[in-house]
Amino acid sequence: MTMFRFLIAITLLVLSSSIIAQATHLRAGEITVVRKSCAGLTFIITVTVYTDSESTVPFGGRQSDGLDVLDFGDGIRIIIPETPSVAKPELGANIAVASFTTEHTYGGSGRYLISYKEPNRNGGVLNMVNSILTTFYIETEINTDAFYGCNNSPKLLIAPVDKGCTGVAFQHNPGAFDPDGDSLSYEMVIPFRDRNTVVTGYRDPNNSGFYTGNFDTANENQNGPPTFSINPITGTITWDAPGIRGEYNIAFNIVEWREIAGQWVEIGYVRRDMQIIIDECDNERPDLIIPNDTCVVAGTTLNVTIFGIDIDNNNVKIEAFSELFGDTFISPAKVSPNPAVFQSVVPDPAELTFEWETVCEHVKDQPYQVVFKITDNGQPNLVTFKTWFVKVVGPAPEWNLATVDFAKRHVKLDWDEYTCKNASSIQVWRRVDSFAYTPANCETGLSPGLGYEMIALVPASSITYTDTNGGLGLAVGAEYCYRLVALFPLPRGGESYMSEELCIAPILADAPVITHVTVEKTGESDGQIRVSWRKPFEIDPVQFPPPYQYKVWRSEGFTGAKPWVAISSGTISDTTAIDNAINTLDKIYSYHVELYSATINNPAIAPVDTSATASMVRLDVQSGDQRLDLSWQAFTPWSNLSQNFPLHDVYRGAEGSTETAGLVLYQQVNVSVNGFIFSDPGETAPPLVEDEVYCYRVMTRGTYGNPAIDEPLENYSQIICAQAADEEPPVCVPSPVLADIRSCEEFFADQSTCNINTFSNEVRWNRVTTTECEGDVLGYRVYVANEINGEFQPILINGQTFTRDTVFVDNNLTSFARCYKISVVDRSGNESELSESICNDNCPYYELPNVFTPNGDGCNDFFSAYSNREGTGEESPNPSSLNCQPAYKERCARFVEKVLFRVYNRWGVEVYTYESVLGDDVDKTIYIDWDGRDNSGTLLNSGVYYYAADVTFNVINPDNRVQTIKGWVHLIR
C-alpha cells in the first residue's frame, strides 16, 4: 500500500510538472470568422493567440494528446496541430503571435458556437484560482441563417499586449470593426475554462483584495475608489487604477447587431480573453488631443491633426487603427508619419496627420471608428486610447423643376441624377405649406417633427416622380412642398441629407375648399360637428356658371375608408353645415363636400366635383402617475403643423364641463417643437389629484399655405375626461373572428394563388357593450404573433397603438400565417385582458415528380418541384415543361421557405445534395432544378434513384413546419 501511494504521488508530480511546463506562454486570443461565399455555408475560421516569445511551448498540440480542441459547434472537433509563434518586437518585448486557419462547411442554417481550448493558462494569475490548472478558452458565435443575410465576424486590429502600472489607469481597446457594416457593442464577461463554465474564483481586477492602501482613494486621481469597465460603444476598457503588481486576466465580447425589419437583432459575437501585467513603476500615462466626432458628405476630403503630450516629457508614438486603412478599402485614409515613430513632446506636442478622401462607397448608417493609441517610451511603456467617430453621409439630392397639371391636380417632380450610383432608393416627401429648415450637422433624413410624409420610394436611378395623391388628385387650394432623401443599401445602410424644399403654386381652387371640421358638441348620441368650406373661388364661371349648391358627406374613421353617408337629403347653398345626432364621444368622422353646378352645355344642376377629405380632431388621453398624457391627430388637406401658427390650445375643466361652460384655456403647445402631445401637469405645475376627473379639449391651428385662404384654420376636438392614477383595467373583452376565410381546397383550386406575393387578413369584433365598460372605452388594441405559441406584440394602426374601429385589415403580409388577440383600452389608458387568440394559417403545398429526362429536348430536362413561376421573379430552366406537364402549373408549390434535398442510388449512397437559400438568390431556388449530375458534376446513369426532401413550410404551428417527403425518381436519358 505504501509503494502504491508513492507511485501515485510520483505520477501526479509528473503530470503537474508537464502541465506547468506547458502553461507559461498564452497571453491572449480570439477567434475570427470569414464567410467564404454568400452562396454557401463554408467559413474560414482563424484562431489567433498572443504568446510569450521566450517560451518554448508551441501553440496547439499533438493529435495524440487531444487537448488543443477547436470545436466548430456542430458536433465536429479537430485538434489544432503544433503551430510556431512568430516574434513581434514591434508589439513589445517578448511578444509573439501564432495563428491557425482552417475551413469548415456547416450542414444547415443556425447559430453555431465556435470554441478553442488548451490547458495553457499562465500560472500565478491573481484574480482566479489555480490558473496554472485552468484551461485557456475562447469562443465566437456565428449565425448562418439566410434570414439575417451574409455575415462575417468583427475584426480586431489592436493587439492585447500593453502593460500597466500600479496607481495609473490602464486602458485597452481592441480596435474592432465589422466588415459588413453591422453595429458593434461591447460587454465584459467572466473568463471561461470550457463551454458554459467560468473559471474558478474569478474577481474583477478592481476588487478590494488587490489593494493595500486606502481603497476609497485608489483611482488615478486619488479622489475615488478604483473602477473597472468597458465603454459599450467605443470598446475602450479602463481600469482606474490597478492595485498590487502581478498578472490579471479578463475577457470581453464584441457583439454584432443588425437591423432586421426595423428591429436590432444580435447576430453573433467574438470573445477576446487577455492577460494584463501590472508592475510597480514611476511613469504617467501620455495623453491625446483628438478632434470632435464629425460628419462629412461623401466626396469631401477630411484633414485633421492629432496631438500627443506626456507629463513626464517622454517621447511618444501615435498610432491609428481603423478599417479605413485596410488594403482592400476603397479610397483608404492615410496618416503621417507611417509607420509610427517616437516623437518628442518638447517644445511642441507630437503630431499625427490624418487625411481621407471620402467617396460615395463610404456612406453607411453607422459611423466609422478610428482608434488612436499613444504610447510613451517610459518604463514600462504606458498607453492611452481615444476613439474618434466619423460618419459619412450622402449628398443631398438636387431638384430640377416641378410641373403642375392643374386639370388632373397632379405634380410632376424632376430632379438631377443622384451623384452616388451606389444608392439604392430615393424617398419623396411631401407636406402642405412651406417649412423652412436647415438640418444640423449629421442630421440626415427627415425628422417627423417637420410635418412631412413620405409619399414614394423610387429607385435611386429615377429622376422623376408624378404625385397623384394615390390617384385621388391633390387637394384644391393647397400649396405642396417636397423634399428628397437618398437611401443606401443594407446591411451598411445610410442616408443623405435632405434636399432643399421645392414648393409649387397652390392647386387651383376650382372645387370646394374644406376648411373646418370642428366638434361643436361632445355626446354619445347628440354630438355635433360643424363643417365649413370656401366656395370654388378659381372655378371657370363660363364652364360652370353659378350659383353653386353643395352636399356634405360623412364617413367613419380618419380617411373616409368606410361607406359615405350624406348628412342631409338635399343640397344647400350655404358654406357651412352642422352634422347632428352623431357619436362624437367615441367615434371619429371625416367629411368631404360635393359641388353641384350647371355646365355650359347643361343647365341642370348636377354633381361636378368634390373637395378633399378632412377628419375631425381626435383627442386621446392616457393616465399616468399623478399626470395625464394628451395626444391628438387629424387627417386634413391642410397642415396643422405650421411655422406661422405653431401654437395649439389645450383647455381644461372639471368633470361635467361642456363646450360652453367649465373649460378654460390651460396651456398652449408649440407643436413644431413638442409634436401633438401634452402632459398635464407640465414640469413646473403641481401634480394632479388622484381619482379626480379632469376634462380636456384641444384647438388646432392650420393652413393651406395659400394667401387666398384665410388662416389660421381653427378646429376643436371633442371633450375627453380621465382621472390620474386610474389603474382599474376594463373587465370586458372582445371576441374576434376572421372574415372571408377560404378552405385549402378552395385555395388550391384557384391557380392565381400561385403567384400572390402579398396577403391580408381581416379581423372583426363586436363593439363591447358590457355595463362595466360602457362609456369608458377609448378603443381596442390589436396584438399579433407569427406562431401559435409565439409572443403577441401590439401593432400600430394608422400610427396609433389602438383603434376605435371594430375591423382591422392586416395588409401587405408575406403570408396568411398570423394569430391575433384583441384588448379593450379605457380612457385612462388601462387595458383589459387579451381575448382568446384567433389564427389564420397558410395552405402549404409541395410536390415532386417521379420522372425526368435530362436529354436536352426542352421537356422535363430538370427535376423540379411542381411550380408556376410567373410573377415570382424566377425563370424556370425548362419552361416548356409547363406545356408537356400541365400538372407543374396546376399543383404549384405554395408557402415553402426552404428545401434540403438528398438523392441516393440503389445502394443507399448519397450522390447529390442540394439546399435552398432564403432571399433573392435564385440560384438556390426552392424548386431544386436538378440536372441529373452528382455532387462532383458527373452525369449520373439512367435508373431509379431515391430521395428525401426536408421541406420547411411557412405555417402557424412550429411543430408542423418541417416535413420530410420521401420518394423515388426515374432518371431517363
Image (tube, rainbow, N blue to C red):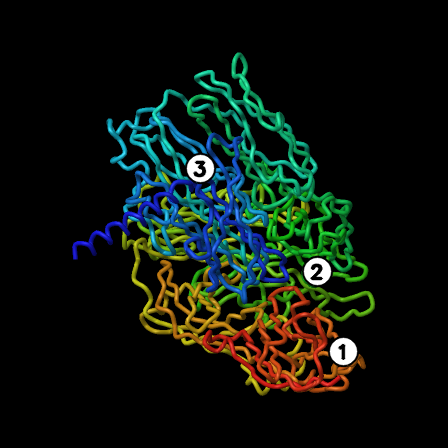
Give the mark, 1 or 2, whose residue is nearer the N terminus: 2
Which residue is disc 2 drawn over? 473
Which residue is disc 1 drawn over? 879
- Front residue (pair 905, 731): 905
Decide if residue 531 is in sight here.
no
Give the mark, 3 or 1, whose residue is nearer the N terminus: 3
Amino acid type, label 2: Gly
How far apart marks 3 and 1 lie (CA) works out to 64 Å
Residue 483 in percent (x, y) is at 67, 47
Quarter the C terminus occupies: bottom right
Residue situated furthest left in the rendering: 1
Q: Is residue 408 above or below residue 816?
A: above
Q: Nearer the viewer, mark 3 or mark 1?
A: 3
Which residue is disc 3 drawn over? 52
Give the mark, 2 or 3, whose residue is nearer the N terminus: 3
- Front residue (pair 558, 958): 958
Label 3 secondary element: strand
How far apart marks 1 and 2 lie (CA) works out to 42 Å
Residue situated furthest front in the rendering: 3
**Neighbours of disc 3 within 10 Å: few (<14), some (14-19), many (20+):** some
- Front residue (pair 411, 208): 208
Amino acid type, label 3: Asp
Is residue 813 shown left or right of residue 225?
right
Mark 2 touching mark 3, by CB under 8 A?
no
How far apart marks 2 and 3 lie (CA) works out to 75 Å
Residue 659 in percent (x, y) is at 43, 55
Q: Nearer the viewer, mark 1 or mark 2?
A: 1
Label 2 secondary element: loop
Amino acid type, label 1: Pro
